[in-house]
Amino acid sequence: NAGVTQTPKFQVLKTGQSMTLQCAQDMNHEYMSWYRQDPGMGLRLIHYSVGAGITDQGEVPNGYNVSRSTTEDFPLRLLSAAPSQTSVYFCASGGASGANVLTFGAGSRLTVL
Amino acid sequence: DQQVKQNSPSLSVQEGRISILNCDYTNSMFDYFLWYKKYPAEGPTFLISISSIKDKNEDGRFTVFLNKSAKHLSLHIVPSQPGDSAVYFCAARWGNRDDKIIFGKGTRLHILP
């Protein structure tokens, strides 16, 4: 049982480059989300999805796109990376709304030069 | 406006003693509170939670206390062990929605030998 798998674990980008952070879960969870963690800022919600075909914005969505074509996968796209997007990104999934507990991936550390 | 506040960035406790981590919140709509634990280079993992209709929840060495009138909750770890050294995030949810989970900035707990 792998839980939530994120790839890559580390990535260095130049300003303006694009990339996709992958997230996959094998728990058949409907809810998936992306957070970023910055020093002194805690975890902030970027985008979330309550099921395949449904996505919505969180607290800090600017500069990021998401899609949810399957229950299992929830990729996060950076179309034109900026240094302000240097952060550690966590994908999380949860059961039906109200399940309360999120399962997090191990994180993806992104550096934008 | 920070809705979930962890005012102590770090805390050091002697092994075997009690660790008390505090969390304050401002939104009276929060109906569920959670604590997550995070080791370096790993994702946060769920530790313990409490519903707003309760004032205490216990799970082994971990107890969470909720004081709704003061909008304050605390996590007690007794006795503290070396493996408890980690960052602890307080989180609060409202509206029975996983996307409405707000995290605090975290408290780094150091257990001293």
Image: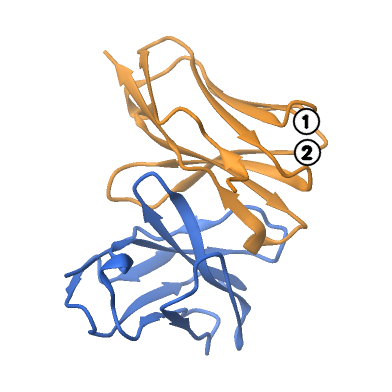
Mark 2 = which residue?
Answer: B52
Chain-order first, disc 1 or disc 2 = 2
Q: Amino acid at mark 2?
A: Ser
Q: Colour of chain B?
A: orange
Residue B90 seen in render: yes
Where residue B80 appears, as percent x and y from the top left, is 42, 18
Mark 1 = which residue?
Answer: B68
At x 39% / y 44%, what residue is drawn?
A40
Q: In the rendered view of the protein, which quadrant contains the C terminus of chain A?
A: bottom left
Comparing B113 with B26, the one in front is: B26
Q: In the rendered view of the protein, which quadrant contains the N terminus of chain A?
A: bottom left
Residue B59 seen in render: no
Q: Amino acid at mark 1?
A: Lys
Q: Please tell me whether residue A97 is drawn above or below residue B64 in the rendered image.
A: below
At x 40% / y 31%, what residue is drawn?
B9
Where residue A100 appears, as percent x and y from the top left, is 66, 53
Q: Please tell me whether residue A55 is drawn above or below residue B91 in the rendered image.
A: below
At x 72% / y 58%, what residue is drawn?
A98
